[in-house]
Amino acid sequence: MAKSAEMQKFKGTPGQIRRQRIERTGAIVISLVLAAWILVNLLKSPQQVAQVAVLGLRNGLLYALIALGYTLVYGIIELINFAHGDLFMLSAIFSSYFITVWFKQDESNPAGWLTFISALFAVMAFGAVINVLIERLAYRRLRNAPRLAPLITAVGMSFLLNFIGLKWNGSTPRQWPSVIPNNDIYIGEVRINMTTILLLLVGVPLLLALNFIVTNTKSGKAMRATAQDKQAAALMGINVNKTIAFTFAIGGAMAGAAGLLYQQSIGTTNYNLGFQLGLIAFTSAVLGGIGNLWGAVVGALLIGLVQGLNDGLPIAFGQQWSQTVVFAILITILVFKPAGLLGKVTTEKV
Amino acid sequence: MTAMLEVKNIEVAYGKIVAVKDVSLTVNQGEIVTLIGSNGAGKSTTLRTISGLLKPRKGEITFKGERIDGKPGHTIVSAGICQSPEGRRIFPRMSARENLELGAFLRNDKAGVAADMERVLDLFPHLRERIEQRAGTMSGGEQQMLAVSRALMGAPSLLLLDEPSMGLAPILVEAIFDTIVKIREQGTTILLIEQNAMVALEVADRAYVMESGEVKMSGKASDLKKDEAITKAYLGGH
Ligand SMILES: Nc1ncnc2c1ncn2[C@@H]1O[C@H](COP(=O)(O)OP(=O)(O)OP(=O)(O)O)[C@@H](O)[C@H]1O
Ligand SMILES: [Mg+2]
């Protein structure tokens, strides 16, 4: 016994080795199944695969912007902020009012584009302020309470925002005009519409900016330190409350931007949007390893892609199975990799 | 001598558990003062309260003439008090260098920070070799050196050390106490908690002995070293 333990010393305990083996087998099987599925479709209609992949990735980018808010907040205070999806929903409604009602823009012209850009700043500020207020008024007081208390509060907060959304938007979906040009560009046979390009133009810089803030700025350093050990962070002179508020602010700003992009590309708002997209975004964060920033992005792109392929390919389960497919993949991956794709078992954070 | 830090009759509790009752102590400019006492006596609680991680229920704390009790931790750091806490509390997922940089979080004098980085790496040459290593993967002793260095990076006027020799090999214990003396010579006042009372009394000017949340005895370190009760209780007795 002692001898075999000695021999395995360099690879980890027998349990870890078994775990690694299971993970590897699982990864290979899942990748093979996915590859086979895509291959069959590729043979049938390559152009369509590319087309739906683009759409899927576009949605994935939108999910990523929302997922970051879940993962940032979880990373810093280990709270699943159930209200985050609803913040996205309110941001979408805010954007609609900003562009259509307050500034009365309904066409794709320079005035419309200018309003869009102002709306982007406004809605990011809106998301940031609301999220900071939620933290300030509710979660901060419960920071040292048993973990169930803030969790329940987050659920309550979600209901509250939902109610505001219901009053603001009305109980039925509302259509809004878009100020984004509706012409398309073609890459080969693949059609890419303007909203996709806009999502890339806004979403990718936002992700890069966030990454820069977290890895290179003083505030980012304070965030990472606070995520690892709040008391030690305070002993470094870091203002822990301010740092947590800042984290909520950037998470909220991302959800705000997502709200505008969604509203302008899909054109419809509804009070229960937060539940639908929030769930998918939260799933993305878990899939990627909650608390891990790039994990959330990878998870979101993957879910967007799989959803896109499933909904749009000739050989697939089809749209009515969309959610089922997403969650089946989530569960399968979590079985093999419980901490998510990029998460470490030791809860890797921020 | 002027009192740099004055703790007056503080009482500190964790919920219903009163960990510190009616503790008073002073630290004068340029001194090394040590806080010794048995496990659970309330030493770390006292230090945490000075650093603003806990709020006293009663009493007051003044630093350089200003009330600091009840203020948040970061304000106290900016006032000039840094702590190397019990259990090291280094940031495990950051490199040693990042940990040290965080120690200087509030400082804006780049040149001064760089000079202090050199200074602590001279104090602990061992750290220099490991500067890019993830702190969580460092050995206990290395982490301890890192924790002390990190506190020094804040260029404190008062340095609080909670068991800095914890987990260190005997030779390193000696090194760390040499370092403590050196730090004082460089102008930093020190309040030190130490299990190893003998060594602590060796380097300290004055000492406070705590027991069950109260100060039981205090005085010049050299006197306490001769005190029979102390010798019996904390120094292994002869
Ligand atoms: N977070 C906490 N919650 C509840 N009780 C605590 C907490 N921290 C410390 N205590 C209690 O407060 C008392 C004083 O603890 P403290 O850590 O200050 O002792 P200490 O003198 O530093 O002991 P040691 O020499 O073992 O480090 C102990 O009885 C301890 O159990
Ligand atoms: Mg202690």
Image (cartoon, helix red, strand yellow):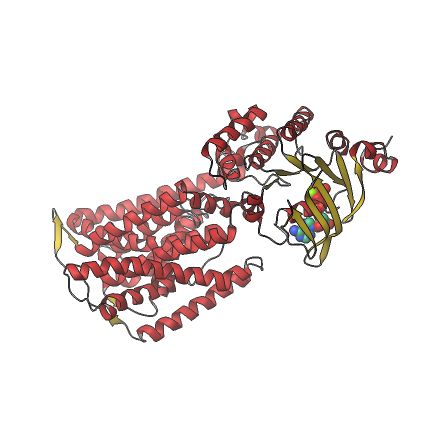
Is B216 on the left-hand or right-hand side of B161? right
Residue closest to the eye, A254 or A309: A254
Q: Quadrant of the N terminus of chain A?
A: top right
Q: Residue at x 44, y 49 (%)?
A: A291
**From where the camera sits, is residue A327 visible?**
no
Q: Measured along the vertical axis of the image, is residue A322 above or below residue A46? A: below
Instruction: Between residue B5 and residue B228, name the one nearer to us.
Output: B5
Q: Where is residue B58, by image quadrant?
A: bottom right
Tell me where residue A135 appears, x and y as whole percent: 47, 60
Q: Position of residue B146 (x, y in %)?
A: 57, 33
Q: Is residue A319 left or right of residue A185?
A: right
Task: Tell me if B157 is positioned left or right of A294 in this view.
Answer: right
Q: Is residue B154 visible?
A: yes
The spot of residue A134 in percent (x, y) is: 45, 63
Q: Which quarter of the frame holds ligand 2?
A: top right
Q: How many marks?
A: 0
Q: In front here: B229 or A148?
A: B229
Say above or below: B238 vs A311.
above
- The answer to whether residue A70 is above or below residue A220 is below
Q: Residue furthest front?
A: B1
Q: Where does the image place residue B121, in percent across and percent down from the top left?
A: 54, 26
